[in-house]
Image (tube, rainbow, N blue to C red):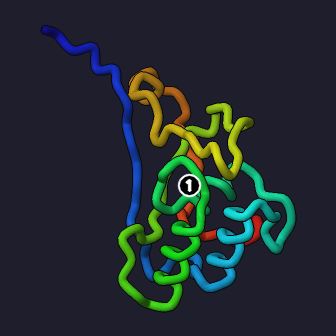
Amino acid sequence: GSSTGEGRVDAVRDFDTGDASIDVTDALNALRIAVGLNPSFGPANAMDFIAADVDQSGAVNVTDALDILRFAVGLETENAPRWVFLDETQDLSGTSSTNVSYDTGTESGAIIDGGDLQLTGVLLGNLAAEV
């Protein structure tokens, strides 16, 4: 069959040494979210929940905090921090510590049609307050 060129264009990037540091505070903030508390910097938003769900299981839990902690102290971890890029037009209003669901990338038609590509990068594992 013929292809219309429609589909999704995805974008991810591995953690790089030039990226924001991921430290024990990030792990503690992920743990706070996992047990139902606010992070140290105040109420978490959708991007914080996404960043805390480092294993991308759909929920923030203690294993996410442990993965972030292991990475922060230089140990091997199955779910190392990395970047995901989200189409910022998607509705993230229902995002919570128990409901982390999002699409990465964007519809390819948006690029083919010459539309602006508006992607927001989230570094999984980095729970620093927004600056």
* Relative image position of residue 59 (x, y in whole percent): 58, 51
Q: Is residue 35 left or right of residue 19?
A: right
In this rendering, would 91 be left or right of 19?
right
Give, as a three-letter code, the residue at label 1. Answer: Gly
Relative vertical location of residue 74 with respect to residue 131 in this rendering, above or below = below
Seen at 68% across and 52% down, the residue is 97
Name the residue at the left extreme.
Answer: 1
Residue that protrudes farthest toward the bottom in the picture: 73
Q: Which residue is mark 1?
A: 121
**Corner quadrant of residue 127:** bottom right
Q: Nearer the viewer, residue 83 or 35?
A: 35
Q: Residue at x 13, y 8 (%)?
A: 1
Above-or-below relation of 50 to 103: below
SS of the residue at dot 1? strand
Rendered-image quadrant of the C terminus: bottom right
Q: Residue at x 71, y 36 (%)?
A: 94
